Image (cartoon, rainbow, N blue to C red):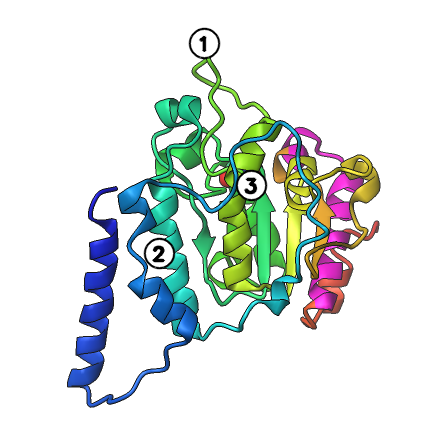
């Protein structure tokens, strides 16, 4: 995406000028923000995420420092850092087969000020077309689940482990699971998203999201769901992927997902009404 850095710079200058016109004389800018601005645009050199090249083995992620140890960003710094990251990610060309077949990079949606981040697997056909995660049938179900907690899509942040739709050579429809080397190559993007947002809680939607986040899958999603995990200090609730709910209309599976979401609500100190508690109780 040529010129993206300059677009970003222009937007920043425009914003500062409008503040000046409104009489604002000083703005808070952390050293991190200033160094981001001073840094020549990575995407204009080459779209290179910060991480090493693809490896076929998913690395363990436990050794890295807590996400909360990174310097606290101001609201404006968060917005700025995420906009910059988005520009870089949209220009990523690391996975050639995915670049060749994708319509666009599906970066993420929601607010950088979210307490809750939901992480899925990879964009499907609809997401590839729209450029937004979880907009197809599974996405509509996810939106309902989010709304059932009292939140909505604008109050959370939704992203995928893989930012491009996995290619399905020879097929027009259908999805495939991301390959370990694809997840590893793409991970730096979601890693930065998490570092910028510093969410209080994350929900990993399905086994692939758990594997992508934790770097391992100690047991299947059926055993892991409902049991808190952690990604660099951030509590992670594994639950079933909404696509699985669509394929498997079992009452018990739906109840499990709702129980997992209630654990998330409790962790976020969100109120839970009697009606919410009894959604999936058998009458
Ligand atoms: N499934 C996912 O995991 N992510 C999406 O964005 C859509 C469907």
Q: Magenta region: which residues?
A: 244-267
User: Mark 3 packing: few (<14 Cα in 10 Å), some, or many (20+)?
Assistant: many
- Residue 223 % position (x, y): 84, 40
Residue that mark 1 sits on: 170
Q: Quadrant of residue 270?
A: bottom right
Q: Residues within 10 Å of mark 1 (few under 14, many from 20)?
A: few
Indicate which disc, 2 or 3, sits on the residue closer to the N terminus. 2
Q: Secondary structure at mark 2?
A: helix
> Mark 1 near mark 2, Cβ–Cβ under 8 Å?
no
**Which marked residue is nearer to the observer: mark 1 or mark 2?**
2
**Magenta-drawn stretch, dominant element (helix, strand or loop):** helix
Question: Which circle marks residue 84 in the picture?
Answer: 2
The residue sitting at the top extreme is: 170
Callout count = 3
Q: Horizontal and vertical percent for residue 225?
A: 78, 45
Q: Gap between marks 1 and 2, in whole Å? A: 35 Å
Q: Tell me the residue that label 3 is attached to.
A: 161
Q: Is residue 178 visible?
A: no
Q: Disc 3 on helix, strand or loop?
A: loop
Mark 3 Cβ inside 8 Å of ligand 1: yes
Looking at the image, is mark 3 or mark 1 nearer the viewer?
Answer: 3
Residue positioned 71% across, 43% down in the render: 60
Q: Are marks 3 and 1 in contact (CB under 8 Å)?
A: no
- Find out whether residue 256 is within the magenta segment: yes
What is the quadrant of the N terminus in the image? top left
């Amino acid at each position: 995406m040529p010129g993206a850095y300059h677009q970003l710079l222009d937007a920043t200058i425009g914003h500062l000028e409008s503040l000046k016109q409104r009489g604002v004389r000083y703005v808070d800018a952390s050293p991190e923000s200033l160094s981001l601005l001073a840094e020549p645009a990575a995407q204009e050199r080459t779209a290179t995420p910060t991480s090493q090249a693809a490896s076929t083995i998913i690395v363990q992620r436990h050794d890295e420092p807590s996400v909360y140890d990174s310097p606290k960003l101001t609201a404006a710094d968060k917005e700025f850092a995420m906009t910059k990251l988005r520009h870089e990610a949209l220009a990523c060309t690391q996975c050639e087969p995915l670049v060749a077949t994708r319509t666009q990079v599906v970066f993420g949606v929601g607010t950088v000020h979210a307490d809750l981040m939901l992480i899925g697997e990879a964009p499907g056909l609809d997401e590839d077309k729209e450029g937004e995660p979880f907009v197809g049938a599974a996405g509509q179900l996810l939106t309902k689940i989010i709304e059932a907690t009292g939140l909505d899509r604008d109050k959370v942040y939704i992203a995928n482990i893989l930012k491009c739709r996995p290619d399905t050579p020879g097929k027009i429809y259908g999805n495939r699971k991301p390959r370990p080397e694809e997840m590893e190559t793409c991970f730096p993007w979601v890693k930065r998203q998490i570092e910028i947002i510093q969410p209080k809680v994350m929900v990993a939607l399905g086994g692939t999201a758990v594997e992508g986040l934790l770097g391992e899958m100690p047991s299947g999603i059926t055993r892991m769901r409902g049991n808190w995990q952690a990604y660099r200090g951030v509590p992670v609730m594994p639950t079933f992927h909404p696509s699985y709910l669509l394929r498997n209309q079992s009452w018990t599976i739906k109840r499990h997902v709702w129980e997992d979401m209630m654990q998330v609500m409790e962790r976020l100190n969100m109120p839970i009404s009697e009606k919410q508690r009894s959604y999936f109780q058998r009458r």
